[in-house]
Every structure is written in structure tokens, then in C-alpha cells.
Image: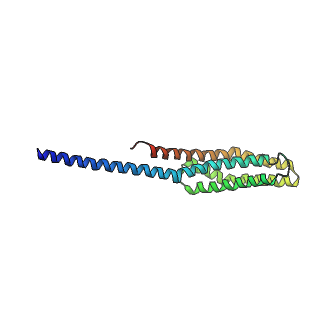
Amino acid sequence: TPAALRALLITLVLLSLAWGGLGGWVADQHASAASAMVTVDAPLSLDAQQLYQDVADADVTATTMFLASSQPPLASTQRYLNDIDQAEAGLSALRAAGGQDQASSAALATLARDLPVYAGYVAEARSDYALGYPVTGGSFLQVASEEAHLDLLPAAKTVFDQRNDALGAASAQAAGLPL
């Protein structure tokens, strides 16, 4: 009958509109997740990885620059100072981003507190080596290296792991099935 066909037609139109609305909503969710992944999560994950690498390279450079002689080459000193500057810049970017869980916030606080302490120990070691006191310089260098391995690198790894997990979650949301 014509009334039944009209009711069926209206029902199908309404279902089509609902299906289109759901499709638009899902597309918007995927697009916003992909955008967040590209603009926020991926750069922060890269910053966290770079922070870990800068701290590790600074420690290796500081440790090895005094093995050859008590007066390290200028290139090694510049590399160490560049690593420290880049680590501080990466730390500032990660702290400014916010939105971390409690473990990541604690790790960032540890890095902010201990990175200047580490740099101070290395500076003291450099000055002691320059003054001709390799024993005390070596002691400060050992304390600096312990600071890096016991506090700085584990904290940087915690931050990287958290940022990498956030990137994985955003990637799964951007590429996953709807709902």
C-alpha cells in the first residue's frame, strides 16, 4: 500500500541520514586523532628520544674527553656543551607540553633537578683537570657519571616510554576501527 511504502521510504531516509552522520563523526574522530598524532604526540616523542640521546652522549663525551689528556680538545668540550644545551631545550619543551601522568611528571622533575647538578660535577671535574688535579677531577667525573646512569638516564627513559605510549595510542585511534 502507498502508506506502508511512504513509511518505509521515510525510515530508509532517516537511517541513511543517521549512517551518514555516524560516518562523518567517525571521519572527524580519525582526522583529529591523526592531526594530534602529527602535531603533538610525534614531536614530543621525538623530543623525549632526543633528550635521552643527548644525556647519554653528554655523559660519554664528558667521560672520554679526559681519557686522552688532562686538557680535552675543544671539539669534545663543544660537543658536551651542545649536548647539555639540547637536553635542557628538550626538557623545557617536554615540561611545557604538560599532560603527563604522575610517573612522567616525576621523571621530568628529576631531570630538571639533576641535569644542572650533573653539569656542575662535570664543570668541577674540568676545572680540577685544568688545574692539574686529575685525582679529584676523576672523582667528580665519576660522581657525574653515576648521576647520569642512576638518575638522569632512567628518568629520560621513563619520559620517552610515556611519550611513545601516547604516540602509539594516538596512532591506534587514528588508524583503528570506528567505535
In this view, the residue farthest toward the right is 132
Please indicate whether residue 106 sits to the left or right of residue 80 in the image: left
User: Which part of the image, by quadrant, shows the C terminus?
Assistant: top left
| Residue at 33% over, 48% down | 22
Q: Is residue 86 left or right of residue 177?
A: right
Q: Position of residue 112 (x, y in %)?
A: 65, 54
Q: Residue at x 63, y 54 (%)?
A: 90
From the top left corner, tell me how far across and down residue 97 is, in percent: 55, 55
Write the residue at 67% across / 47% down. 53
Q: Residue at x 65, y 51 (%)?
A: 111
Q: The N terminus lies in which quarter of the figure?
A: top left
Furthest residue in direction left, as rendered: 1
- Asked if residue 99 shows in the view, the reply is no
Left-right relation of 6 to 128:
left
**Can see residue 160?**
yes
Coordinates of residue 5 in the picture (x, y in percent): 15, 45
Which residue is more in the foreground, 55 or 72?
Answer: 72
Q: Is residue 173 left or right of residue 93?
A: left
Give coordinates of residue 138: x percent, y percent. Answer: 82, 47
The figure's colour scheme reads: rainbow
